[in-house]
Amino acid sequence: MGALATASSSRADPGAAFSNPQIEARVDALLGQMTVEEKVGQLNQFAADTLTGPGQVVSDGDQKIRSGQVGSLFNAVAAKATNRYQKEAVEGSRLHIPILFGYDVIHGFRTLFPIPLGLSASWDPGLVERTARVAAQEASREGVRWTFSPMVDIARDPRWGRIAEGAGEDPYLGSEFARAYVRGYQGMRLGDPDSIIACAKHFVGYGAAEGGRDYNTAEISERTLRDVYLPPFHAAVDEGAGTLMSAFNASDGVPASANPFTLTQVLRDEWRFSGFVVSDWTAVREIMLHGIADDGRTAARKSFLAGVDMDMQSDLFLPNLPGLVRDGEVPADRLDESVRRVLRIKFALGLFDKPYVGTTEAVGVPPARRGVDLAREAAEESFVLLQNRDTGSGALLPLGAGRGRRIALIGPLADSGLDMMGSWTGAADPGDVVTLRTALSRRVASEGMVLSEARGTAIAGDSESGFAEALGAARSSDVVILALGESGHSSGEASSRSSLDLPGNQERLLEAVAATGKPIVLVLFSGRPLSIGWASRHVPAILEAWFPGQQAGPALVRVLFGDSSPSGRLTVSVPRSVGQVPIYYNSLNTGRPRSDPIGLGDKKADPYYVTGYIDEKNTPLYPFGYGLTYTTFSYSPVRVDLSTISARALKAGTAHLTVSADVRNTGAREGTETAQLYIRLRGTSVARPVRELKGFRRLRLAPGESRRVDFTLGREELSFWNIEMKDVVEPASLYVWVGPDCTQGSPAKVELGE
Ligand code: GLC
């Protein structure tokens, strides 16, 4: 993945989406008329109506807008509001510069899709692009033309609540999804009225917060930064994303919103990014709390000169930058460049030509049918079937008359619309959510089955007053569906947990229901992987549903009854216990490996002095890439078209490897398999991970059908940042796997010669 971390880019000119001679000419003409205060005004952003962070809504907003001191507003989500503010700017200010309205459109605007971690489990970038397209169409109708999405932070620590907002632990997969979101949001042309500008966030390293504690310090080496945390941002920039958001955290003692290495050397000098960077909420002001500025003026100067172009909610650029420019502490041309970056985006979006939107109040209108159908499709593809054991008459799922007519639905998440939405719910209405209980009631009635229900317990808390009713419902059933997990707001921002257990006394309820001897289908709702060790040992069927969004119920019923087969695959490792964290598949082998991942005798002769715990295994409960469905698949041995190849030719891009395998549906039902390509490099100048994902294919196969999958390995897949911190392909022994997850298969070996 290193190739994209260099100056080169896989696209001719990623900035072409928002820069061309006509736009530049209009920017120059406008810039020439602006006072210093008006220029700084374009770099000032604050929340219009609602708060998504600490502080208060600015009171004299209209006055600031009329005086040209507001470049952007966010959290105004209805056309009536955005048009009103826009009128103040366009008709009330001297230069009539339109406002750019932003909003956290994270997994939908009015139509709510699964949380991003759930969407990533689909391993379907095309699906995610379609959801982003619908979100853009809905948001733009309200005047919102900028979303603070995609969140592309790599996360290896499920204690961190914001793992819910991203695409998991892998940089290759994270990069593919980053591209998909940018394509979906920005559409074919930014000037189209239903395009919105993307914002890759949080730049950079936010997911490495120590202890999984939100906003906490990260310690990331430059090599890990370039190999793991930067690639999804580079992919987003390469795909033409117009903005980035700088993060709260410090890494290596430098706050991300005042870090010239990442914000200028990497982003501008190496990647040639020509869009603009907005700080996260009050992150400019917070560099005083980090301790590298004693006053607002210093904070503004350091953050601006490091590379932050727009100040979200700190209100420090506005009062300080004009003086800093006049005192020569901030060069005038540096100010002009930041203003240019903002204005070109506004011109590219067509805001100068069409600043207003139609006044249809779509926010209050139910989501369109197309969006609702897509929400159900996305939810179905997001579910990961973790277990589906035989309970004596075959695998427990899918349900149906053969499984008994009486179903008990138990648990605090069976009928909670709000919790199905997860964090960052946009302009969606909980009233639009169809819960599992609602959909199951309809299905059971249509099948002439019998449904009994009991909440059993709360999501959090320790009261067992509901247990008796729940156990009664279980005893009178043939199969129990247990809807357990977290509340929708116990992940997302400022929602780190020190435990990965089921909250409250849900585990006790689970054990009590299991003690009735009835077969259980555990449907798990969570914004992070949970350490469900007891359940994995005692519950025959477990479906991870994440937070599925507004079509939670219909999607779950279709999968539980087999109308559609689960096809999701994990994009995060599921720990056995929180003590294993951070846990991720693409780790280094160490000098004392406990296992021997590629059978090279890595396993130390002595089984004692090896890396591990005395009270826990090293391996996760369920590994990255894993997921079951209602059929089975087999893989042929992996094939490579060359047994040796020149590293130099690979680096030059004049040679590549072809890797292939045959995948067969060996079961009795149609199913979708995600064939995954992994590599390992040995003999390199720095240690490389025991496995790295470098490709995947989603295959829909009929029973008995076999299909060949082909992958190409070239410079982009085989380069990495070596001992001299250069992004190169080195001579090495290359091992390649094609399999169903990060643990299976036998590798083929290829020598990368000089
Ligand atoms: C929040 C979040 C960021 C969000 C922004 C605006 O603090 O960190 O992800 O986009 O503020 O709501």
Image (spheres, grey):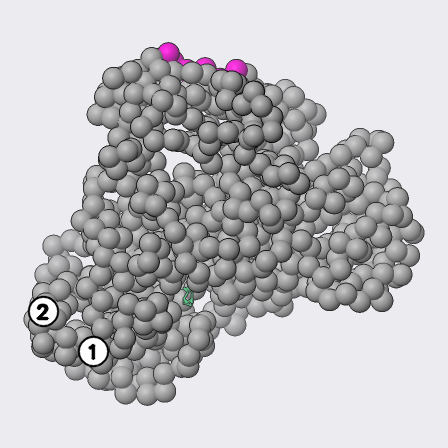
Quarter of the rendering containing residue 437? bottom right
Verify whether residue 642 appears in magenta. Answer: yes
Of the pair 210 and 742, the residue shown nearer to us: 210
The percent position of residue 373, horizontal first and vertical second, equals 57, 51
Neighbour tally class for label 1: few under 14, some 14-19, many 20 plus, Cα within 10 Å: some
Direction top: furthest residue? 643
For ligand 1, give the image quadrant. Answer: bottom left
Q: Compared with residue 739, is residue 296 higher up or lower down, i.e. above or below?
A: below
Quarter of the rendering containing residue 563? top right
Q: Compared with residue 51, is residue 747 higher up or lower down, i.e. above or below?
A: above
Point 25% across, 17% down: residue: 754
| Residue 292: mark | none
Closest to the camera, between mark 1 and mark 2, is 1
Q: Which amino acid type is marked by label 1?
A: Asn
The percent position of residue 591, horizontal first and vertical second, equals 46, 29
Point 50% across, 59% down: residue: 213
Q: Does residue 51 show up?
A: yes
Quarter of the rendering containing residue 173? top left
Q: Which residues are magenta?
A: 637-643
Q: Does residue 700 show up?
A: no
State the residue position of label 2: 332
- SS of the residue at dot 1? helix
Q: Compared with residue 609, is residue 178 higher up or lower down, i.e. above or below?
A: below
State the residue position of label 1: 320
Q: Compared with residue 49, is residue 689 higher up or lower down, i.e. above or below?
A: above
Rounded to the nearest whole Å, what is the CA distance between mark 1 and mark 2?
Answer: 14 Å
Point 32% across, 88% down: residue: 60
Is residue 144 found left or right of 326 in the rendered image? right
The percent position of residue 574, horizontal first and vertical second, equals 60, 43
Instruction: Count how many numbered circles sit on residues in the image.
Output: 2
Is residue 664 found left or right of 482 in the rendered image? left
Verify whether residue 498 appears in magenta. Answer: no
